[in-house]
Image: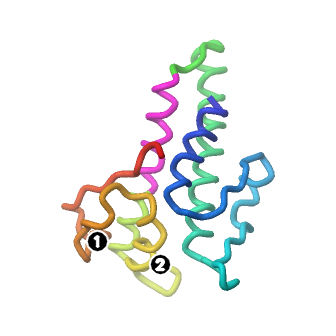
Amino acid sequence: GQELIWSSLRDVWSHTGADWKEPSWGTTIGAACAVFKSEQGARKTSTEKLWCILATEAVHLVWKLRCERVIQRDGAEFARQEVVNRFYSTLESRLNLDRRTAARARGKKALKPQEVDQIWRPILECSDNLPPKWVVDNGVLVGIKRGR
């Protein structure tokens, strides 16, 4: 399942247009330290935040699936489609968490709706057709782009 999760991560990341960082335990655990820059040399903080989210969610899913496979399934492998579905479900759950957090933003450290928009928009399905307040409007359904 690990290779399939890395492959799915690469597919999602391809929508950002940013350089691909080959995932390993080091690059995923240190995901918060990844630096992405524009051609002019300016840091792309939204891209850095998205990488941090995607990489850490992916590595956490690898760990969860391994534990589940070893403990609950007596070593039985997961079907490929189940791994892919769980990967996208994990990302959509995280997106919804960020949206709910921004909708109730309080304090200086809270996520702001425009930050959530900047972070997630590159990988959202139909991102060009989203209404202006899609982040805080729970009536707007959004999903993660699949494939390349």
The front one of 53 and 100 is: 53
Secondary element under disc 2, as helix, strand or loop, is: loop
Q: State how many labels appear.
A: 2
Q: Position of residue 137 (x, y in %)?
A: 23, 68
Disc 1 residue crowd, few under 14, some 14–19, many 20+, Cα 10 Å? many
Name which residue lies at 47% across and 36% down: 86
Give, as a single range, the part of the protein colored magenta. 80-94
Name which residue lies at 45% across and 64% down: 122
Residue type at the position of mark 2: Ala
Say if 91 sits above or below 133 in the image. above
Specify the farthest residue to the left: 139
Q: Which mark is residue 136?
A: 1
Name which residue lies at 74% across and 68% down: 33
Q: Which mark is residue 95?
A: none
The front one of 102 and 53 is: 53
Task: Determine the main secondary structure of the stretch shown in magenta.
Answer: helix
- The answer to whether residue 91 is magenta is yes
Point out the frontmost of discs 2 and 1.
1
Residue type at the position of mark 1: Val
Disc 2 residue crowd, few under 14, some 14–19, many 20+, Cα 10 Å? few
Counting residues from the start of the chain, the first of labels 2 and 1 encountered is 2
Name which residue lies at 51% across and 20% down: 79
Secondary element under disc 1, as helix, strand or loop, is: loop
Say if 40 sits above or below 37 in the image. below
Q: Position of residue 51 (x, y in %)?
A: 61, 61
Residue that numbered label 2 is attached to: 110
Left or right position of 140 against 36: left
Q: Position of residue 25 (x, y in %)?
A: 77, 46
Q: Position of residue 126 (x, y in %)?
A: 30, 58
- The answer to whether residue 20 is magenta is no
